[in-house]
Amino acid sequence: MMDRRAVLRIALAAISLGAVAGPVRAEVEALDPEDAFRVSATRIGSKTIEVVFMVAPGYQLYRDRLSFQMDHPDVTVMGIDLPEPLEKFDPALGERVWLYAERFTARVRLSGANVGARLIVSMQGCAVDLGICFPSMEKAFNVPPI
């Protein structure tokens, strides 16, 4: 059985090793883009699709990097209604950018036939606190006719 001095030496050695090793830092990893930027699409009328974006805290999507297109020859995107974006100066780019940093909804206005088609949403965003920008990504949604 160990005597008190041996236990004390082991405890002091463990404390000393902790001091030499330094403080422990928690490494924060970026979310997968699919989790950072969740998107859903629902046809709410024969000529309108509602697209809901859920942007995770600490992430942002660039307005100028959003695009919407239909993959059916008889249906075209006529316009997009977006909420007012946040305006921010980006020191890395040296210019102002417009972005979304929380939940928002886009209304995609269509022309053409009321047929089932796929909506393709393209977007690009960043993890602000981590200084990471993701490559452009696409999400496709099957949109039935109404």
Image (cartoon, rainbow, N blue to C red):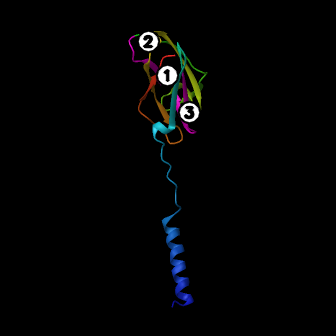
Q: Amino acid at mark 1?
A: Asp
- Asked whether residue 62 appears in the rendered view, the answer is no
* Front disc: 1 or 3: 3
* Residue 116, image x, y percentages: 44, 18
- Between the C-alphas of marks 2 and 1, the distance is 23 Å
Residue pointed to by mark 2: 75
Stretch of the chain drawn in magenta: 50-73
Tell how many labels.
3
Name the disc covering residue 21, or none: none
| Mark 2 or mark 1, earlier in chain | 1
Q: Is residue 25 above or below residue 46?
A: below
Q: Residue at x 52, y 29 (%)?
A: 40
Name the amino acid type tagged 2.
Val
| Label pair 2/1, CB-CB below 8 angstroms | no
Q: Is residue 8 above or below residue 115?
A: below
Q: Reading the chain from its start, which is encountered first: label 3 or label 2?
A: 3
Based on the displayed image, in which of its 4 quarters is residue 107 positioned?
top right
Local packing at callout 1 (Cα closer than 10 Å; few below 14, some 14-19, many 20+) is: few
Q: Where 72 sits versus 59, above or below?
A: above
Measuring 50% from the left and 28% from the top, which residue is drawn there? 94
Query: Percent from the top left, x then y, of residue 141?
Result: 45, 26
Q: Nearer the viewer, residue 86 or 80?
A: 80
Residue behind mark 1: 64
Helix, strand or loop status at disc 2: strand
What amino acid is labelled 3 in the image? Answer: Met
Residue 105 found in image quarter: top right
Closer-to-camera residue (61/145):
145
Q: Looking at the image, is 67 positioned above or below residue 9?
A: above
Numbered disc in front, either 2 or 1: 2
Based on the picture, tell me whether residue 97 belongs to the magenta stretch. Answer: no
- The residue tagged 3 is 54
